[in-house]
Image: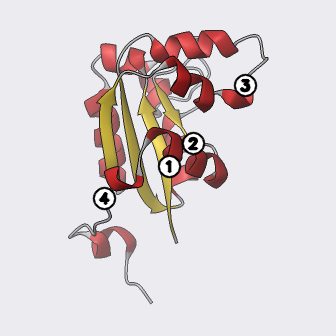
C-alpha cells in the first residue's frame, strides 16, 4: 500500500542550490511526486510543525531556522516511502550521516541539516495537512510503474 511523506528542502539546502539534487535522488529511487511548492514558512506554520519540540531548548532555534529563507515543500508517494526516504536522508546531522546519504554527502553541520522528512505515517498525515491543502496534491500513475514495482497481483 502506498504512503505519503512530507519532504522539505530547508533554507540551507535551497541557498546552496541542492533542491534539484534532492528531487533527483527521490525521482531516481522511483518515488512519485504528488505536490510541491516553493515558499517562505510563516512563524505560525513553523511553530505548528515543530510543536512536538515545544519547551525543548532548541525549539526557538528550529523555528528561526525554518523561517530564515525560502524552502521547497513536497509530498512524495510510494510503498514504504517514509522508511526509505529517511534512510536516503541519513542521520539527523551531517557530521553523523553516512556517505551516500543526502546529509552524508552534502552536510557537515551540527545544526543545519538540509532536508526534513516525516518520521511516521501519523506525523506524515499531520505534516502534509499543515503544509498542503488536498487540492494541491495530484494523484497519477507513472508510465513506468510496472518497471518500478513489478507485477501487481
Specify which label sits upstream in the sequence, 2 or 3: 3
Residue 109 in view here: no
- Residue labelled with disc 3: 53
Crowd tier of the residue under label 3, counting other residues whose Cα lies within 10 Å: few below 14, some 14–19, many 20 or above: some
- Residue labelled with disc 2: 118
- Which residue is at the front of the view, 110 or 123? 123
Crowd tier of the residue under label 4, counting other residues whose Cα lies within 10 Å: few below 14, some 14–19, many 20 or above: few
- Residue labelled with disc 1: 5
Secondary structure beneath disc 1?
strand
Secondary structure beneath disc 2?
loop
Instruction: Residue 71 in the image: state x and y as whole percent.
Output: 37, 24
C-alpha distance separating marks 3 and 4: 31 Å
C-alpha distance separating marks 2 and 1: 6 Å
- Residue labelled with disc 4: 138
Specify which label sits upstream in the sequence, 1 or 3: 1
Instruction: Judge from the rendering whether residue 89 lies leftward or rightward of residue 83; answer left or right.
Output: left
The residue mark sitting in front, 1 or 3, is: 3
C-alpha distance separating marks 2 and 3: 14 Å
Instruction: Please report contact status of discs 2 and 1: CB closer than 8 Å, yes or no.
Output: yes
- Which residue is at the front of the view, 12 or 127? 127
Instruction: Please report contact status of discs 4 and 1: CB closer than 8 Å, yes or no.
Output: no
Specify which label sits upstream in the sequence, 2 or 1: 1
The correct choice, above or below, for 125 with respect to 73 in the image is: below
The residue mark sitting in front, 4 or 2, is: 4
Specify which label sits upstream in the sequence, 4 or 1: 1
Amino acid at each position: 500500500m502506498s504512503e505519503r511523506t512530507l519532504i522539505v528542502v530547508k533554507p540551507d539546502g535551497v541557498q546552496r542550490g541542492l533542491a534539484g539534487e534532492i528531487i533527483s535522488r527521490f525521482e531516481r529511487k522511483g518515488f512519485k511526486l504528488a505536490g510541491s511548492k516553493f515558499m517562505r514558512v510563516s512563524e505560525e506554520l513553523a511553530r505548528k510543525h515543530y510543536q512536538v519540540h515545544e519547551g525543548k531548548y532548541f525549539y526557538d532555534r528550529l523555528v528561526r531556522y525554518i523561517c530564515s529563507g525560502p524552502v521547497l515543500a513536497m509530498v512524495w508517494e510510494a510503498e514504504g516511502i517514509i522508511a526509505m526516504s529517511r534512510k536516503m536522508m541519513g542521520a539527523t546531522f551531517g557530521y553523523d550521516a553516512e556517505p551516500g546519504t543526502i546529509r552524508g554527502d552534502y552536510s557537515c553541520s551540527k545544526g543545519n541539516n538540509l532536508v526534513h522528512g516525516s518520521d511516521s505515517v501519523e506525523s506524515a498525515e499531520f505534516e502534509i495537512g499543515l503544509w498542503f491543502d488536498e487540492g494541491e496534491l495530484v494523484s497519477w500513475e507513472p508510465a513506468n510503474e510496472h518497471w518500478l514495482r513489478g507485477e501487481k497481483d
